[in-house]
Image (tube, helix red, strand yellow):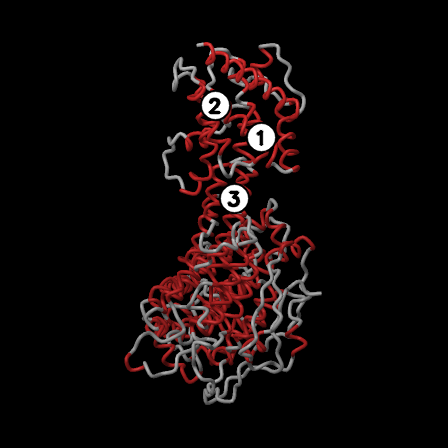
Amino acid sequence: MSIYPYTIRYTHDFVEPANGSFADIEMLEIPDDASSVSSMTEGVSSSEASTNEFELFHSFIPQVDLNEWLDSEDALLDYEFQDSIYTRSLEPLNKFSEAYIEYVNLQYKILDQMSQFSLLPTDDPDQQDEPMGVVLATYNKKATDNFTDDSPTIDDAFTKFTHNVKDFIGANEDVDVDIDRFCCIGSILDCLRANYFYTDTALKPTLISNWVNWYDEQPDQDIADEVVINTPKPYLHPLFWSKYLAKLLVRGLTPQAVEALNQSLVEETKDSDPVFYQVVVDFKVLLETYSTLALKGEFTKWKYLCSEFRDMIPKLKSEIKEKTNSDLLDQILDLLRVITGFSITIEKYCENWYEYYLCLSLYKIRDDELIYKEYYEEAIQRFPPSVLDPLDYSSVSENCFSDILSGNMIKVLNTINRLDPTTTAYVSRFLEIKGLLQPYYSPLKTITNADKTISEYFLSCHAYDCLSVQGLYPVGFGILLNHNIFKNEERRYQNEQTIASVLTKLDFKTNDDLEWALTVCAKLHLRSTAKHIYLKYGKKSLEDGFIFESLNMFVKCYDPYDMKNVEGIKEIHTIVWDLIFQDSLLNNRPVKDELINNVVKHEAEFEIHPIINQCISPYGVLYEFFNSFQGTLYGENYSVKHKLSRLIHLLKFQFMPKKFIPLLLAQTLPFFIDKRYQFELPDLVIIIELIDTFDLSASALEKSQGEELYLYSIDNIESDTEPYDWRTILRSQQIEIPKTLKEFIILLRNYITVHVGENFITNRFV
């Protein structure tokens, strides 16, 4: 079973018509060998560990394939968040996964930098009446012209993209994953770069040499050791000229060839066979000047010098003194035929078509862009490509090289896609911008912004993969919000709704991440999504003990114009009453939260939301009541009216939960016990009315809740209580704390009765 999540289906080979017209192509042309292509690389070995790693990053399985998606206006790539994948991505990652996330982020940065490049024409008065849309065959020249000035930038970006792949390979060579698949990708990208992404045709042979030598490193180190390292006189070794030096020249490794000649000890012939020695010296000089003259545009001059030298060699044969050196001269002549472009001689020293193609590009004609197609055709004629073996990465790579040079870019994308869908997405965008996917669009189709592109398909799939991975969801968002990729308004809207859905499921680890998500909501006007996030992280802050932060979150998800969405204000009420106010009242002291206390003291160094100020004000009154016992507000004033004014205010508060009334009434007990406090009759009447109101208006549930809080308060007395704590005062006076709410009410009424009587007697006889 394939470990790759999606494929592109084919029915027959794409062949470019001789006249260059694509009028008969309707969307995608599909190869006959569907079975072989669709199964490509499915059998390539991969360990169970690497399979699991790739599943983490490639979980999205599209319901429609590329052809169906392009052909149908209604076909959409529906996304569903992968909870199990996301949960896995939250766990500690191994070295490969961390490196892969970094790799994806690096490649995305390159894509983001290319956002300036649109597939639509730039503003041009002469083209304002032209239909707008993706690049089509009939639109070929205008699209190409649009990118002419920016081609170096695109080429440089692709070079950086390729380097990122190789850096990723280097960082994971010792990791237990199937890194060979990325080596395969690296060689494919080198081939693409060498043949399409270069800033100057003069550089093309060098890039082809880099591609071939990175993919298939030659000559072997064993031959180098045998011929140069372990041989006393390398130039006399039977393989030095015909095998080792020939391979270096065929591969374009002229600096290495010069170094090999320097180490060959041919200097010993300087006196004994001066003509032979001078031939070698002149040959070395030609090799030393190759790169310099070729890159200066003087390759023709260099080749002329080589040809003159080649033609002179037979005339020098009679002047060679040693028979051995005479034989070596024949081998040098053969090498001169190679570097002067003799196809028959080149074929003799090449082992495969891409090596032959490289050698022609190096030594035949370098600077004619059109000639390279002929080189490829000649190469595969002399060295027919091998039949695809899907179990062999080398076979997969070489077949992909053929597809690249044949212009079969959909097959190229298919191959890369089976190796790593992530890389495919970015490569498809490069190919799209370069115009290499133009032949696959119908010239009969009306050009509009509604048109779908091949790169949009792959980038959508990649973005959906990223959305379910903790370290990659910003990449997914960035791709889906790129309007140069997604031209159609309907698909842009679909992407925004997808992002809105994902935002509600993500776990933001830092405040920066959270602020970033809320910025996305603001940019996309996702008001309900932002409310959901505020509500979710308000609850999380509350669980973590950050009370004021949670209040701030909850207040931001409150909308006074949407009375259906009141969950945020409910949470605020819960925090204010059931956490802050209740904790303070149960323990008869201000809460142990300096930030909350600074807010009610109006000493906070930041702006407080009016709703928070309003909702927290009852606790502010209770805080002031407790704080009044510190002796700073009232000094030695023992007037009950002064002390109980805040408490009475709370007891009379219209929205005071009735379950708190008993414990608020309990705060009056110290005033009845301490004889220094003088009650006036109106004060006592108010307290009686408050008790009666609670008895008569509180429901059975409210009374039960009130008793539950009362019992908790008397059963859970902190070791360090405040001097004004009513429970402490009762104990200090050796008065038993009532064990039930009913007993407490009776005790309180008895104290009131006594003080009413005392007040009556005092006023009666004064």
Q: Which residue is mark 1?
A: 692
User: Which quarter of the rendering shows the N terminus?
Assistant: bottom right
- Find residue 230 and name its label: none
Q: Which residue is mark 3?
A: 538
Residue at 49 percent of width and 75 percent of height: 452
Q: Amino acid at mark 3?
A: Gly
Say left or right for 119 vs 85.
left
> Which amino acid lies under the numbered mark 1 shown in the image of this protein?
Asp
Name the element at disc 2: helix
Between circles 3 and 2, the one closer to the viewer is 2
- What x and y, as percent, mark residue 195? 45, 71
* Corner quadrant of residue 181: bottom right
Image quadrant where residue 365 sits: bottom left
- On the image, numbered disc 2 is attached to which residue? 683
| Between marks 1 and 3 in the image, the one whose residue lies nearer the viewer | 1
Q: Left or right? Give the position of 468 relative to 369.
A: right
Q: Earlier in the sequence, mark 1 or mark 3?
A: 3
Of residues 444 and 200, the one drawn nearer to the viewer in this rendering: 444
| Residue found at the very far front of the displayed protein | 764
